[in-house]
């Protein structure tokens, strides 16, 4: 009985999460006329209230066709997202994993101070560091290039924080045994640290992907050239004329994040738990 | 420094270890470990035995002193270059690798030729009964099997020195006894010098060719199990080694009717001449006697002491009789299994005076030389 009650409450709460997604999908299947008719009171100042049917009255794939076949701008932005997010994630692994390993397994001078600096940087919202980042990137001549997004993202401190938690769970005896067996510090990292810390690395990858795939502030601040904009900036350009296409773009943009989420759900949960925080 | 003794494999020369906060974990440790011997470091938890082992392994820095292997000081040599294999308390297997890869790891790190590596892995796996488990991951093995893999990984390298840090402490009693015998026979077969750390004195007595008893970072005594058992050099060793513990009580030497006697609470026992000579000048004494050196006596025996039986522990082979009496120290007697006494009955006992151990009550050192 109690279980049923809990399930009922959870279903009720889940309903509020699912409704916008459902409306997004049903909206993406509406024709332009149906959309205009439903949203007329909002978009063109007509009388009455805007309506949104649970299922499109005249479902059509026309908005999908329009976006996928007739909107090259969408593909450019999709590609921009890919070439910006993938190197960032690669950077998280290549730069973040060794840094996290060092924090987790070694004692060195100023370790505490450096770790505190990492935490402070991690907790700072983008808006706080935006101006200083802009000035530095501008001096380096990187403003208006994809590197202004990739480099700061790749050197983010958040994945380091996540991975440290996982690396510290590897028993000292295991790495000491490897050292006794003749492994160099790099071999210990490579042959034991990376495989045993894989859940941590994957959680950092999943969380990083979700964060940077949806990021808007940095591209808006550092990329003036709109041909470099990622997909996340396509959506704000919604007007009454292309509302349907925008909904389709939202659905398509959701797909990679959804796939990453589904494949990495286990690691994502571990990552969120280990970081003790939720973005 | 050159090794003066050909039979010595490892020398520990006045080694000290300080931890931050002025914790002196190992104090002036000095010993020689002979080629092929099985030396056991034994002592209570926190006595510094594992720290010393880790210093030999190179996993812990040496604050002061020297560790010499063969002819060279190895203080600064990294663990991987010491030719030492170690078996850890919690096995420390590589969980991401199969048993075969675990055993192969040290060979791989040393770039051993593949054919030779395969041959060695097969040989060691057969010896330890692991052939059928080679493709399993450590997570799918029992505690005893994991322990064997850890041993195999150490053995496959054919190192100069084996270090074992309480390797049996996570196993159940039966398996522990089995593995104890297995480790000893493997060590004898391979002839590799071995240092074994334990807090279990039974393990130390049954496994070691020599035992080093350590307490509070200080080496108390080193010798064969028999030497240590028969002639403990101080009160700590006397109390630590042996089960049930040695009976120890505060005693005085008195003269009565022209005889020199030793007090046992209210009772008196004669003291052998040679002991008397050794103890002259010692005012406060502690006297010890092993439980098996107390025996049942006739009540009519003039040297008999009357006590009450508090508890009897029968192991089948022998009985431990726990005795007490007003004005007397508690005593434990180990005797024949068909001993007839029962709890709450009185019992006459006799101490074998030639088996007494005399210690200084304050400093704890031994007065007589055994």
Image (tube, rainbow, N blue to C red):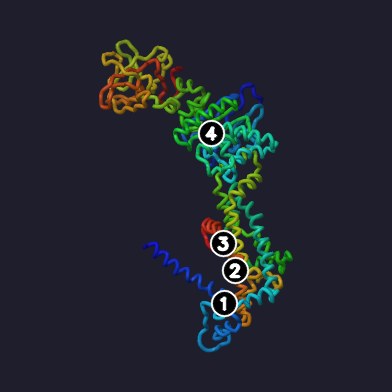
Kindly indicate whether the residues beneath marks 1 and 4 are on one polypeptide chain: no
**Residue B142: image x %, image y %?**
50, 40
Label 1 SS: helix
**Residues at marks 4 and 2 touching, judged by CB atoms closer than 8 Å:** no
Q: CA distance from mark 1 to mark 3?
A: 24 Å
Q: Which residue is mark 3?
A: A262
Residue nearer the viewer, B30 or A47: A47
Q: Is residue B256 left or right of residue A154?
A: left
- In the rendered image, the residue lying farthest to the right is A141
Q: Residue at x 35, y 25 (%)?
A: B320
The residue labelled by disc 1 is A27
Q: Is residue B2 visible?
A: yes
Sooner in the amino-acid sequence: mark 2 or mark 3:
2
User: Picture coordinates of residue B227 (x, y %)?
Assistant: 48, 20
Image quadrant for the N terminus of chain B?
top right
Q: Residue B67: which quarter of the image?
A: top right
Q: Circle 3 sits in a helix, a strand or a loop, which is it?
A: helix
Instruction: Name the chain letter of the residue that bears numbered label 3.
Output: A
Q: Chain of mark 4?
A: B
- Give me the C-alpha separation between circle 4 and circle 2: 62 Å
Quadrant in which the C terminus of chain B appears = top left
C-alpha gap between disc 3 and disc 4: 54 Å
- Neighbor class of circle 4 (other Cα within 10 Å; few <14, some 14-19, many 20+) is many
Most foreground residue, A78 or B305 = A78
Q: Which residue is mark 2?
A: A254
| Neighbour tally class for label 2: few under 14, some 14-19, many 20 plus, Cα within 10 Å | some
Residue under numbered circle 4: B26
């Amino acid at each position: 009985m109690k279980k049923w009650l809990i399930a009922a409450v959870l279903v009720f709460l889940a309903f509020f999460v699912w409704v916008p997604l459902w409306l997004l999908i049903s909206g993406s299947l509406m024709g332009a006329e149906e959309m205009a008719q439903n949203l007329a009171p909002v978009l063109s100042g007509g009388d009455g209230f805007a309506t949104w049917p649970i299922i499109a009255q005249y479902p059509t794939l026309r908005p999908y066709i329009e976006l996928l076949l007739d909107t090259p701008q969408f593909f450019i932005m999709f590609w921009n997202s890919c070439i910006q997010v993938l190197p960032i994630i690669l950077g998280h692994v290549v730069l973040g994993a060794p840094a996290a390993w060092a924090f987790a397994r070694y004692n060195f001078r100023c370790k505490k101070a450096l770790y505190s600096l990492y935490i402070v940087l991690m907790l700072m919202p983008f808006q706080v560091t935006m101006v200083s980042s802009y000035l530095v990137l501008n001096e380096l001549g990187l403003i208006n290039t994809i590197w202004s997004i990739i480099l700061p993202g790749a050197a983010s401190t958040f994945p380091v924080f996540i991975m440290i938690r996982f690396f510290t769970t590897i028993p000292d005896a295991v790495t000491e045994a490897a050292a006794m067996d003749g492994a160099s510090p790099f071999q210990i990292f490579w042959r034991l640290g990376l495989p045993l810390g894989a859940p941590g690395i994957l959680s950092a990858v999943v969380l990083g992907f979700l964060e940077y795939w949806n990021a808007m502030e940095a591209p808006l601040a550092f990329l003036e050239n709109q041909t470099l904009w990622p997909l996340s900036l396509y959506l704000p350009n919604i007007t009454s004329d292309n509302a349907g296409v925008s909904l389709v773009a939202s659905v398509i943009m959701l797909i990679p994040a959804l796939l990453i989420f589904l494949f990495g759900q286990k690691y994502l949960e571990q990552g969120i738990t280990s970081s003790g925080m939720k973005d | 420094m050159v090794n003066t003794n050909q039979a010595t494999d490892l020398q520990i020369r006045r080694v000290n270890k300080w931890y931050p906060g002025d914790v002196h974990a190992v104090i002036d440790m000095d010993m020689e470990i002979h080629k092929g011997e099985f030396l056991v470091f034994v002592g209570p938890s926190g006595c510094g035995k594992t720290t010393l082992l880790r210093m030999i392994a190179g996993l812990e820095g040496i604050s002061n002193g020297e560790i010499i292997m063969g002819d060279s000081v190895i203080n600064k040599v990294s663990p991987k270059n010491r030719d030492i294999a170690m078996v850890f308390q919690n096995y420390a297997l590589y969980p991401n690798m199969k048993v075969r890869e675990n055993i192969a790891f040290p060979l791989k790190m040393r770039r051993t030729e593949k054919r030779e590596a395969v041959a060695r892995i097969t040989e060691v796996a057969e010896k330890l009964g692991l052939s059928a488990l080679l493709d399993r991951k450590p997570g799918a093995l029992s505690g005893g099997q994991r322990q064997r893999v850890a041993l195999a990984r150490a053995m496959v390298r054919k190192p100069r020195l084996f270090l074992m840090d309480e390797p049996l402490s996570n196993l159940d009693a039966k398996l522990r006894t089995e593995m104890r015998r297995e480790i000893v026979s493997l060590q004898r077969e391979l002839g590799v010098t071995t240092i074994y750390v334990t807090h279990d004195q039974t393990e130390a007595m049954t496994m070691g060719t020599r035992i080093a008893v350590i307490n509070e970072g200080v080496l108390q005594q080193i010798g064969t199990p028999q030497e240590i058992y028969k002639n403990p050099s101080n009160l700590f060793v006397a109390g630590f080694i042996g089960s049930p513990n040695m009976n120890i009580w505060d005693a005085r030497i008195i003269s009565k009717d022209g005889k020199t006697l030793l007090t046992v609470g209210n009772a008196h026992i004669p003291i052998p001449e040679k002991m008397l000579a050794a103890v002259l000048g010692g005012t406060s004494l502690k006297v010890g006697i092993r439980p098996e050196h107390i025996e049942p006596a006739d009540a009519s025996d003039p040297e008999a002491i009357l006590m009450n039986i508090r508890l009897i522990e029968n192991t089948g082979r022998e009985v431990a009789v726990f005795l007490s009496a007003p004005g007397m120290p508690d005593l434990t007697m180990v005797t024949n299994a068909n001993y007839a006494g029962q709890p709450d009955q009185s019992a006459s006992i006799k101490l074998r005076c030639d088996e007494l151990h005399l210690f200084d009550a304050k400093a704890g050192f031994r007065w007589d030389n055994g």
